[in-house]
Image (cartoon, grey):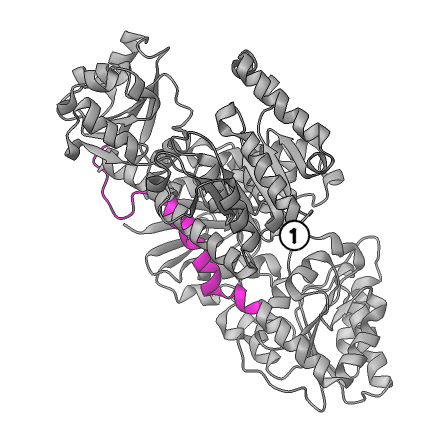
Amino acid sequence: MRTRVALYGDVNLNLIDGSAIWLAALAETLALDPACDVTVLLKSPIDRDLVVAPLLDRDNVEVVTHPDRPARLTPGQALDLIEELDGRERFDVVLLRGFALCQQAAAHDTLHGRLWVYLTDIPQQPHLASDHDRAALGHIAAASQRVLCQTDELRAYLEGLIPEAAWRTTLLTPMVPEAFLRPARELSDAPTLFYAGKFAPMWGFLETVAAFTALRDAGHPDLQLHVAGDKVHDPPDDPGYAPAVRAALQDTDGLVWHGAVSRERVAELLTACDVALSARHPAMDASLELSTKVLEYGAANVPAVINRNPLHERLFGTGYPLFIDHLDDLTAVLDRTLRDAAAWTTARDTARAVAEDFTFPRVRERLVPALAAARPQGTSTLRRRRVLVAGHDLKFTGPLTDVIRRTGVEVRQDRWTGHTGHDQGASRDALEWADAIWAEWCLGNAVWYAERKRPDQRLLVRLHRQELTTEFPGQVDHDAVDKLLCVAPFVADAATTEFGWRDDRVEVLPNTIDTIPFDRPKLPGAQRTLGMVGFLPALKRLDRALDLLELLLDEDPAWQLRIAGSLPWEAPWVWARLTEREHYRDQFDRIRTSRRLSRAVRFDGRVANIPGWFAAVGNILSVSDLESFHLALAEGMASRAVPVVLERDGVRGLFPGVEIHSDIEAAGDRLIGLTALERRAIGEDARNLVVDRYDLGVVGARWVELLLT
């Protein structure tokens, strides 16, 4: 079977604007994989194919018009058509663009867990987002598998508004066709400027024409300006704007207007141009989006004049020669650049280097893990369609249950009241219904289902560390269990040696995390920040973390320790124990009475956005006396944080290849001696290890294989 993607944006593909270009480019990018079938639904019937033409020749892209051919689909009509097509052959991904559209999609239960939403038409400043906006975004995030963000800046903003979205966000950057990649050339003796895009007040087109005219009058008489596009805005509050644009396009000496042209034609026009213009009104500097056209210009080795703002400075560097601070700077910056070939060359090379990371293949490569996770069954045929999850505590089953549902099967739960307590009538009904059973925890639930399952039913039992202190793993009918899935190698060893399970019935299938939201750049200062997620109970060893911090502060006062998680008095089960209370009293007194510790230790409390939190943490601590797995360590490694791990039972089997330290002094010496290059290499290796062993896509696919095939 092939991966099937439905793609719809609340945009008109007859228009040549950024939204339409984005939709067509995304379809092309997805279709680079011949095993991916893309169904593009049209908002309006096509009456010119400048945007969609590249899609029409692709065998694995289907362009669908609503059978009633309305002039414009409403969001409701679009969603109804998607569900109708989905009923014929199920989509693995339903990718939508548009805030209003996605709000309605979130109400369609049949699409939950398969939605990939791309949101740009939302309030992009916190004070502009109403309570209704925040609530709507929360509902959208809860219904979605992926929340796609164009930039890291937009992702950080959205996660600030809706922290729960952090576990679903991933980047979907602008996409540039490889056709734009052209060889570098030198600055022409008679330079040519280029502008493409819409004609709207905030887009600075009239100011661009004014600067161009001024340059021709002040020493550049042969300068030309080539312009592509025909979308002229007519703002109600400025009735003179549209006539002024049309006059500029038709009557400006040296301006060559090409009208509406295809993206391929834009690439051709750029081969004869020297500087592109993408200057905007300063009010747009707050935008969290990156112009695709700027990247197209850079790919063609044509540097662009752009506004200086934090997003552009992050990508192009603070010294980029073609930054402007205001539209009034256009003439001076262009004049200086056209007279300084070295500055122009620097701008050209910088823009090209930035753009190369945004080509169709590079963007497609970054989407591969998410697309693989969207179809956990891969090419397998499913033999079972009804899955029952049974146990007293199902909090660890949620992500894996979502993976199972993503295949299209039905999942139900049988919630027990304890290790042995349950509603026997409800359990019998559930047993009769199911064709695959997952007993979460090897306790009384596993014993009960193993005694009663039918021969045609599949039974998987998951064994954690906690059950090893009970008699239940030895009471289960081993022959009735298809697989005993153990969360760690030492748990599997105990199952065979202490409870007599046969090796062929036992498999290590570890805990899992969705590594995709953790794939984000580190913030400045992260390399000197230790992170600790959860420091309760005392065996987590906050005291060791403080020892390490003090050792590091002796070398560099910039080191700090950030701690996420509940405080001791917020956890009754901890605070009720005198020894625990004394331990934390001593540690808090130690921090309070030390001037440098009180400055360097930060308690962040319960953090909803752990993936975002890890962007500021460059070193993840795992200094506990005992851990059955240590999820926080895996999450930190997925974020490319350097793992700082002390020796303990089982850790080498769980994280092979990770450097294990004998004591705090050895760990501190290692951190102090790391170079920036070594840090990057260790962080990359750490992420690769977690992705290969513990990623939700990898572990989830194995669960699907064992349960359903």
Taking the spot 34% from the left edge, 50% from the top edge, the residue there is: 3
Q: Is residue 186 above or below residue 615?
A: below
* Nearest the eye: 199 or 313: 313
Magenta highlight range: 355-384
Magenta stretch contains residue 343: no
Asked if residue 378 is among those painted magenta in the image, a careful observer would answer yes
State the residue in front, 102 or 413. Answer: 413
Which residue lies at the image location 60% right of the left edge and 43% below the top edge?
551
**Please, what is the dominant secondary structure of the magenta stretch?**
helix
Left or right: 465 as drawn, with respect to 23: left
Crowding at dot 1, Cα within 10 Å, few <14 / some 14-19 / many 20+, comes out as few
- Which residue occupies the foreground of this view, 81 or 600? 600
Tell me the quadrant of the picture where the C terminus can be found: top left
Query: Which residue in the structure is indicated by mark 1?
Result: 524
Compared to 272, does 65 lie above or below? above
Label 1's element? Answer: loop
